[in-house]
Structures are given as structure tokens and as C-alpha cells.
């Protein structure tokens, strides 16, 4: 598999076996003075990556893209950005290759912020330290919460200043992903490639992510594995988005180029966790219409998956009308699957054993109470878990107390001990999330004073977000402004 021997990572280059339209050979730009800012020891250890080698001077040159481990590429893709189709591609990233971890899984190793590529459009191909550390924190936070996500192996500064609204320190993030194949990669193939290109991409994707994919009979003659590909992607996304909703994660820029086929969360730009519960919550400064608001995320995922199905049409059936019918019937499943996953999750958050009409009514009333009393999302469920009902934002209200009584009653008729109920609730209600004010404080110290102590502490806390035995001190406190008015910006 043309692996090159070296002390760092032996990489494969399977993506380069796809037709040429899918990538451009691209070496990272040389950078003047790379310095290691942070390295993910725990991730390196689980994946069998040699951390000592990467922390050496030579290793830092690899993480900065100055030393290459083999041929590197920028991937081509397209995508709907806020509803509009555009040709995109890795404009500031290169794929160094794929690393096979001891578990047999291939991980893309990508440098983000590594300079211009043929897909850079008017961008400089660079990234600033703050946004790269932000991606590091939030992606690791998501991992801690048990949500599928790309991971962050390291951040280095480049020794360059880059121009944004002000001059900022340049940085490069090393990102590991099950792959970087996006809905937008399929859109690109469908729009600009041949049918053969599209088929090659679909086959590669099945081989990498859906080995278990089965041929599905569409009529007497045909066995079609691509219908199952569509089905599996829909199912993984339904599960992923339900997990986001259950912890109050708002991605912020759910464009089709930011939706993976593997089902991992990717591209932590203007994302943030919701403090005060409200379905219309938006943090991103560029999302003026609220397209990607908290409550819209499931619908937007369905919209993106429809674009995925459209791209797959020529593979679903040779007759276009038949293909559309197949796509529609698969897409209809998204809403049902999402609802099932979300209902199971929210019932577990309240200690319910089953999703029943009565339980869902209690859920609905709780969410209404939280919204009208501007309750903190995470802390409400934490307080319910530990039985500190008097601290609930809506405790003073008659309807709040009434809700609590009824909830207690429904729990008591279940076939479960109090301890068991609490255990279930603890496993589904995180004590800590990457709260916006804490993330900002950590980033501000790191970028302005090169003081990483807050950042490391935050990362430590985020490793075990469901551990109720620790004293999390200020990590559970809500900012005075309650997070309202918090604004995030695209990570450029
Ligand atoms: P994102 O908003 O990070 O998902 O990026 C959307 C598109 O813009 C992708 O094609 C990126 O590669 C590209 N892009 C973002 N920032 C830059 C930059 N500084 N230089 C070049 N391309 C960029
Ligand atoms: Mg992106």
C-alpha cells in the first residue's frame, strides 16, 4: 500500500486511488517558525501514535507541514452554503494520508490552516490560533460527551502573522477523521464528474464506512448496494443530530460541505452550546435568518440528506422516476428515525424507562417551562438528576412544582429503584459542557498571553462530563448574561 517508513506515522494514500477529479496534489506551504502549542496525548495513546516523536523538533515540523510523510492532497468538493450551491474544496487544508490504527480503522490525517490550494478562492489558506484551539476544545468536548466527531491531535503556531480584522498568530490544527467525505463530495461528483466518478466515490465510501452494506433488491433483476448506502447515511445522521439536540449543541453552519458521510461532527466554526433553553437559539453572526438555529437542526439535516439523495440518484436506479421514488421512500425514514432516537434520549434524561404518550407529555411540558422561565438547559437536567429541585429556575412557579410532582409520580410507578433511575439519568445528563464563557476565557489567555493553564483545566474537566462524583466548581455556573447575546464567528 505504498506506505513510507518513518518515525511518525506510516500513512496510506487510498483516497489518491480515486479518479483524479477528486483531488489535487498539494504540498502545505512552508512556515517560518513552528512551535507546538498543544498535543493530544490521550488520543495518540489510544491510536498507537508515537507522541514522543511528534513532540520532538522534527515532529513539530511534520505537524506544521514543513516535513512531509508522503504525497499530500487537497480534496475537491462542492456544497450548498446557506442554501446556495458553490464549488468548494479544501481551501486551507491538506490531507497527509490515512493512518491505520490498531483497531483496523483508517483515519484521515489532515493539516488545517496549511496554506493556499487550488480551491482557496480568495482566501489565504491560513488559520488563526484562536479558532484552531476552539476546534480543539469543542471537538474533544464532543468526544467526551460520547458524540461522534473528528478529533484534534495537535495545534502548532507557524511563526507567521495572518491578516484578519487584526493581525493574528497563524496556526495549524492536525485533524483526525474517519474520513473527510462529505455530502458535498457527492454533490461535486454528481455535478462535475462522470457516472463512473460518482460510482467510484460511492464504492470507496462503502468500502471505508459501510462494509456491512448489503445489496438491496429493487426489482426482480437488480441488487443495489447504493440504496443501503443512502439508508445507512440517513440513519447515522438521524442518530448524530439527536445527540446534538440532547446536549444542546448548535453547529452553526450545517452547510452540505460540513456534513460527513461517516456520521461524525465536523468543522467547528461558529458552533456553541446553548445555555438558556430556547429552540430559536442561534450564535453564529453570519446566520441572520436563523437557518441553523437549535430547533432547525433536524430539518436542516433532512434538507442536506435530500441533496445527498439527489446526488446519488443515477446510482439508485437507471430509470430516473424510479430513482426518485426510491430516494423519497428512504428520506421519509429520517424524520421517524430522528424522532425515535430523540424521544428515547430525552426519556432517558428524565429517568423514564419507556417512551409513552404520558411521558412525552411530561417532556413537552418541561421544555415549555424551561423556555418560559429561561432555564439553563444543562443545569435543569443536572438538578433533576441530583434531586435539587428547589434550585430549578421554574421551582417558584405553581406549574413548575406541579410538573415536578407529576414527574415524581410517573417515576415511582416504574419497575426501577431510585438508584437505578439516578444512574440512567447521570449517564444521559452531562454535568459539564464546553460553556461559552469558559471556552472564551481559555482562548483569551491562550492567544493573548500564551497561558494555556485554563485551557488544559477545561479539557481535563471535559474528559469526564458525566462524572457526578467530582466538584466542578465554576464549570457548572452560568454566565451572568445567561449566554444570550453570545456571538460566534466563522473560524477563518
Ligand atoms: P468552512 O466555513 O470552514 O466550512 O469553509 C468553507 C469553505 O471555505 C471551504 O472550502 C474552506 O476550505 C474555505 N475556506 C475557509 N477559510 C479559508 C481560508 N482562510 N482560505 C482559503 N479557503 C478557506
Ligand atoms: Mg467546511
Image: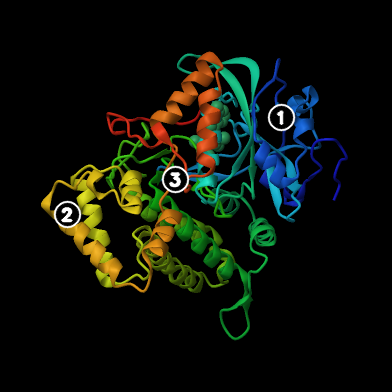
| In this rendering, position of residue 73 left or right of residue 236 | right
Q: CA distance from mark 1 to mark 2?
A: 55 Å
Q: Nearer the viewer, mark 1 or mark 2?
A: 2
Categorize mark 1 by other alpha carbons within 10 Å: few (<14), some (14-19), many (20+): many
Q: Is residue 33 above or below residue 152?
A: above
The kind of secondary structure element at disc 3 is: loop
Q: Residue farthest to the left? A: 398
Using the image as rendered, state which of residue 465 and residue 107 is in the foreground: 465
Q: Evaluate whether residue 178 shows in this view.
A: yes
Query: Which residue is pictured at 19% across the width and 48% down the height?
Result: 395
Q: CA distance from mark 2 to mark 3?
A: 38 Å
* Dot label at residue 401: 2
Q: Which residue is mark 3?
A: 254
Mark 1 lies on residue: 63
Q: Residue at x 69, y 47 (%)?
A: 107
Specify which label sits upstream in the sequence, 2 or 3: 3
Residue at left offset 64%, top offset 56%: 194
Q: In this rendering, does residue 338 appear at all? A: no
Above or below: residue 491 compared with residue 166: below
Comes first in the chain, label 1 or label 2? 1
Amino acid at each position: 500500500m505504498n506506505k513510507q517508513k518513518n518515525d511518525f506515522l506510516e500513512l496510506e494514500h487510498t483516497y489518491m486511488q480515486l479518479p483524479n477529479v477528486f483531488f489535487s496534489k498539494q504540498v502545505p506551504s512552508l512556515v517560518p517558525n513552528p512551535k507546538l502549542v498543544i498535543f493530544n496525548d490521550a488520543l495518540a495513546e489510544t491510536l498507537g501514535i508515537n507522541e514522543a516523536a511528534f513532540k520532538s523538533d522534527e515532529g513539530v515540523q511534520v505537524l506544521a507541514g514543513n516535513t512531509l510523510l508522503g504525497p499530500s492532497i487537497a480534496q475537491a468538493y462542492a456544497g450548498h452554503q446557506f442554501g446556495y450551491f458553490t464549488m468548494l474544496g479544501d481551501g486551507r487544508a491538506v490531507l497527509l494520508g490515512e493512518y491505520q490504527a490498531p483497531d483496523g480503522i483508517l483515519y484521515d490525517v489532515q493539516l488545517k490552516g496549511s496554506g493556499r490550494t487550488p480551491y482557496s478562492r480568495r482566501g489565504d489558506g491560513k488559520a488563526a490560533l484562536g479558532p484552531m484551539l476552539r476546534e480543539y476544545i469543542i471537538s474533544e468536548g464532543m468526544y467526551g460527551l460520547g458524540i461522534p466527531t473528528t478529533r484534534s491531535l495537535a495545534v502548532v503556531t507557524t511563526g507567521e502573522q495572518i491578516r484578519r480584522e487584526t493581525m493574528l498568530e497563524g496556526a495549524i490544527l492536525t485533524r483526525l477523521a474517519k474520513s473527510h467525505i462529505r455530502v458535498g463530495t457527492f454533490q461535486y461528483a454528481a455535478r462535475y464528474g462522470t457516472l463512473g466518478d460518482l460510482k467510484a466515490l460511492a464504492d470507496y465510501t462503502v468500502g471505508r464506512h459501510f462494509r456491512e452494506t448489503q445489496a438491496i433488491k429493487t426489482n426482480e433483476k437488480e441488487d443495489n448496494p447504493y440504496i443501503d448506502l443512502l439508508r445507512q447515511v440517513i440513519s447515522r445522521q438521524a442518530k448524530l443530530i439527536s445527540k446534538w439536540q440532547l446536549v444542546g449543541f448548535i453547529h452553526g453552519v450545517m452547510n452540505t460541505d460540513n456534513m460527513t458521510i461517516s456520521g461524525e461532527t465536523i468543522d467547528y466554526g461558529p458552533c456553541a452550546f446553548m445555555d438558556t433553553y430556547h429552540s430559536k437559539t442561534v450564535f453564529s453572526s453570519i446566520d441572520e435568518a436563523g437557518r441553523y438555529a437549535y430547533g432547525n437542526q433536524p430539518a436542516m439535516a433532512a434538507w442536506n440528506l435530500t441533496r445527498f439523495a439527489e446526488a446519488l440518484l443515477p446510482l439508485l436506479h437507471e430509470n430516473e422516476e424510479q430513482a426518485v421514488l426510491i430516494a423519497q421512500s428512504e428520506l421519509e425514514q429520517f424524520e421517524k428515525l430522528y424522532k425515535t432516537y430523540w424521544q428515547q434520549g430525552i426519556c432517558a434524561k428524565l429517568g423514564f424507562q419507556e417512551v409513552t404518550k404520558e411521558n412525552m407529555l411530561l417532556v413537552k411540558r418541561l421544555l415549555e417551562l424551561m423556555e418560559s422561565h429561561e432555564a439553563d438547559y444543562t443545569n435543569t437536567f443536572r438538578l433533576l438528576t441530583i434531586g435539587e429541585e428547589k434550585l430549578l429556575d421554574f421551582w417558584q412557579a405553581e406549574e413548575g412544582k406541579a410538573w415536578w410532582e407529576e414527574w415524581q409520580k410517573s417515576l415511582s410507578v416504574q419497575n426501577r429503584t431510585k438508584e437505578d433511575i439516578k444512574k440512567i439519568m447521570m449517564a444521559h445528563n452531562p454535568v459539564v459542557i464546553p460553556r461559552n464563557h469558559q471556552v472564551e476565557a481559555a482562548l483569551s489567555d491562550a492567544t493573548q498571553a500564551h497561558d494555556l493553564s485554563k485551557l488544559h483545566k477545561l479539557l481535563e474537566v471535559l474528559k469526564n462530563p458525566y462524572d457526578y462524583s467530582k466538584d466542578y466548581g465554576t464549570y457548572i455556573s452560568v454566565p451572568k448574561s445567561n449566554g444570550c447575546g453570545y456571538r460566534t464567528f466563522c473560524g477563518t
